[in-house]
Amino acid sequence: MITIVIADDQMLIREGLGTILNLEEDMSVVGLATNGLEAVEMTARLRPKLVMMDIQMPHMDGITALKQIKASSPETLVLILSTYLEDKYIVEGMANGASGYLLKDMDTNKMIAAIRDTMSGQYILPASVATKLVHKITELSKGQSAAESWSKRIELTQREREVAELIVQGYTNREIASELHIAEGTARNYISQLYSKLEVLDRVQALVRLQALL
């Protein structure tokens, strides 16, 4: 069972999302928080597997709450849930341990699928978010010439390049498999090979290096 705490100061979002997720057989919303402070307290007390966190909330914002939750309950995964597609929120959220960044207007079925993907260890970055993240990190990155030099040493197969391009576009493992007409397990194998070649551990790091490579 995926136990979830939802933190959002908008009652309609908070309770509406809670109702929708509770209809899923493998999900249970165990807490509804109206601000970051409540989210931190609920996480410590209820130990949910996942927290869905708004960014702009009274008393404590979502990024601050994220930092505290990952410090005290590192096993709890956090998905940023926001109406904002702003560079600083995306970078801060992912840099401080968020497992993904979802926009509130996301299709409900895709959001539910994203939650399950998160629990299976995937980073969730919709295409628009992935693009923003890559561009922002590239702007902030120093030593770009070194990165370009590094990229020349990497050789990808045609299939690995196809997978890499879909990762940059924000596709999940399941979506990559569907797009390339291969099994999801096969897609995971290609992604694992990519991570090894790129010398990275997760999708955020992969995005940074793929920006220099593709």
Image: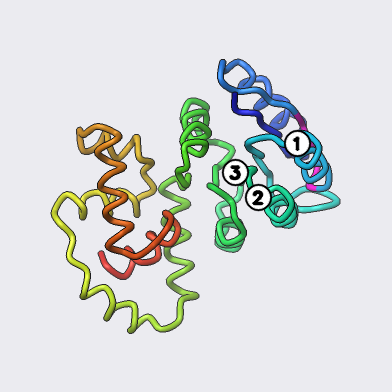
Q: Residue at x 79, y 36 (%)?
A: 33
* Location of residue 145 (image quadrant): bottom left
Identify residue for label 1.
Answer: 10
CB atoms at circles 1 and 2 under 8 Å apart?
Answer: no
Looking at the image, which residue is at 61% across and 46% down?
80
The magenta stretch spans residue 185: no
Disc 3, disc 2: CB below 8 Å?
Answer: no
Q: Earlier in the sequence, mark 1 or mark 2?
A: 1
Q: Is residue 82 visible?
A: no
Q: CA distance from mark 1 to mark 3?
A: 17 Å
| Residue 124 x, y percent position in the rendering | 48, 44
Is 116 on the left or on the right of 57, as rendered? Answer: left
- The CA span between labels 1 and 2 is 26 Å
Q: In the rendered structure, which amino acid carries the disc numbered 2?
A: Pro
Q: Secondary structure at mark 2?
A: loop
Give me the residue at 26% from left, 73% from top. 151
Residue at position x 77%, y 31% in the image: 32
Residue linked to disc 3: 79
Of residue 66 and residue 84, the one placed in the foreground of this image is 66
The residue identified by callout 2 is 74
Position above or below: 20 against 167:
above
In the rendered structure, the answer to whether residue 194 lies left or right of residue 19 reads left
Q: How far from the left and from the top, in percent, is residue 9?
A: 78, 39
Q: Is residue 209 visible?
A: yes
For the residues labelled 3 and 2, the Cα–Cα distance comes to 13 Å
